[in-house]
Amino acid sequence: MASLVALEKISSEVKELRLKDYIDIVTLASLSVRARNLSDNAWLVQEILLVLDETRRPLRNSSSAQDYIHQHVLAVAFDLAEEAAEECPCDIKGNILRNKRPGTAPTRAPLIRCQDKPHQVIAHVRVDAPSSLRLHSHVRLQAASKPERVFIERAVLDGLVVGA
């Protein structure tokens, strides 16, 4: 509920976003929003996406092209959220629930930082790997080794394949 209230409070800023930035935020929200209960996750993602969409309602009504773009952004975001939930069922901290897909181990690949794009990494995945990473697939990134300090948990990041 706190995330929905926060979105309502920054609604004027969301209205002012460029379309590209709005699409990026909707995409990130669809991939990274997680609820405490796995059963509530779909509800929370839907609510956040709908609140973001409602915030942009005045822009949508200004032209049919804007309405068309916003409708399809919302539809793609719902599809991404559904795919993320199916491919990588996880708990609130982002840890993969192994019992949902027995026998399927996550793919491990070293990550290389992109010099010109600070928010992107390169991973060389083997072609014969059992996973099927495709363009626009949802991925979950986690450090392979445990942290040195016991009280720190491994960070889990959600991502999207942008090139192949």
Image (cartoon, rainbow, N blue to C red):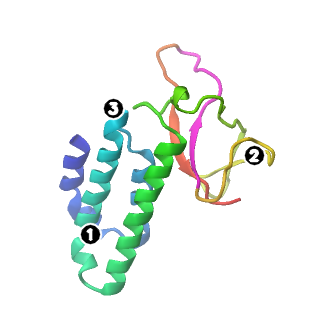
Instruction: Determine which quarter of the picture holds residue 75.
Output: bottom left
Instruction: Determine which quarter of the picture holds residue 62.
Output: bottom left
> What is the three-letter code of the residue carrying label 3?
Asn
Left or right, residue 61 beside residue 127? left
Q: Position of residue 53 (x, y in %)?
A: 28, 64
Q: Earlier in the sequence, mark 2 or mark 3?
A: 3
**CB atoms at circles 1 and 2 under 8 Å apart?**
no
Residue 34 covered by magenta stretch: no
Name the residue beneath numbered marker 1: 56
Say which mark, if any, is on residue 126: none
Magenta region: which residues? 137-149
Residue 69, compared with residue 160, is above or below; it is below
- Residue occupying the point 26% across, 45% down: 3
Q: Position of residue 21 (x, y in %)?
A: 41, 65
Cα separation, mark 1 vs mark 2, equals 38 Å
Cα separation, mark 2 vs mark 3, equals 32 Å
Name the residue beneath numbered marker 3: 37
Left or right, residue 36 beside residue 135? left
Residue 141 covered by magenta stretch: yes
Secondary structure beneath dot 1 equals: loop
Instruction: Determine which quarter of the picture holds residue 8.
Output: bottom left
- Residue occupying the point 47% across, 34% down: 90
Q: Residues within 10 Å of mark 3 (few under 14, many from 20)?
A: few
Name the residue beneath numbered marker 2: 125
Secondary structure beneath dot 3 equals: loop
Q: Earlier in the sequence, mark 1 or mark 3?
A: 3
Image quarter in which the C terminus is found: bottom right
